[in-house]
Image (cartoon, grey):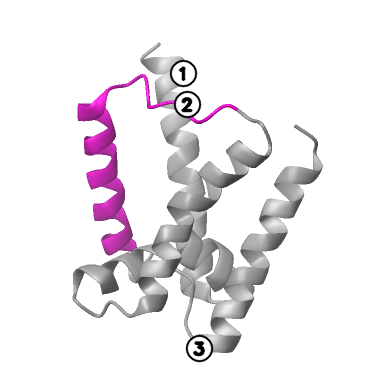
Amino acid sequence: MSLLAPFAGGLLIGLSALAMLALLGRITGISGIFAGVLNAEAGLWRWSFLAGLVIAPLLFHTLAGQPQPLPSAAGWPMVISAGLLVGFGTRYAGGCTSGHGVCGIGRLSPRSMAATATFIAAGMVTVFVVRHLTG
């Protein structure tokens, strides 16, 4: 895979966040979009956005001739537990990494800068514990 693919992906994420703000006046936070679907505020744009999150990577892998992503080797209990913890964390932080990290920092939001620094610090601590303390 060329180095162009990650650059193009990042560019598309930034452009889509900008388009969402310009066209719909909304922040592109995945947890907020998903919560809107769960709270029966599901406009067509929410369903389309979520469907695109699932379909786009599969389509890319197919068109680029890349192997399809495999299910996690950790198993379903770990995947479900991780998903629940992420969901709890996004509610606790008032948003997810896409809302805070991509959109909030782009708007120079102090709250988003603090949340993103916390996400990164928690990830660093987790990697350190998993790789160096638990083996």
In the rendering, which numbered label is found on residue 131?
1
1 and 2 marks in contact (CB < 8 Å)? yes
Instruction: Report the amino acid beneath label 2.
Output: Phe
Mark in the foreground, 3 or 2? 3
Residue 89 vs 5, above or below: the answer is below
Is 111 situated left or right of 34 in this image? right
Residue 91 in the image: x percent, y percent?
27, 63
Distance from disc 1 to disc 2, alpha carbons, whole Å, reads 5 Å
Q: Residue visible at 59% across and 69% down?
A: 105
Tell whether position 124 is magenta. Answer: no
**Predominant SS of the magenta segment:** helix
Secondary structure beneath label 1: helix
Q: Is residue 78 magenta?
A: yes
Q: Is residue 21 above or below residue 16?
A: below
For the C terminus, give its image quadrant.
top left
| Residue type marked 3 | Gly
Q: What residue is rendered at 75% in x and 32% in y? A: 1
Q: Is residue 1 left or right of residue 86?
A: right
Residue 128's label in the rendered image is: 2
Which mark is on residue 25? 3
- Circle 3 residues within 10 Å: few <14, some 14–19, many ≥20: few
Q: Is residue 94 visible?
A: no
Chain part drawn in magenta: 67-94
> Image point 67% across, 70% down: which residue?
15
Residue 50 horizontal side relative to residue 18, left or right: left
Which numbered disc, 1 or 3, marks the residue closer to the eye? 3
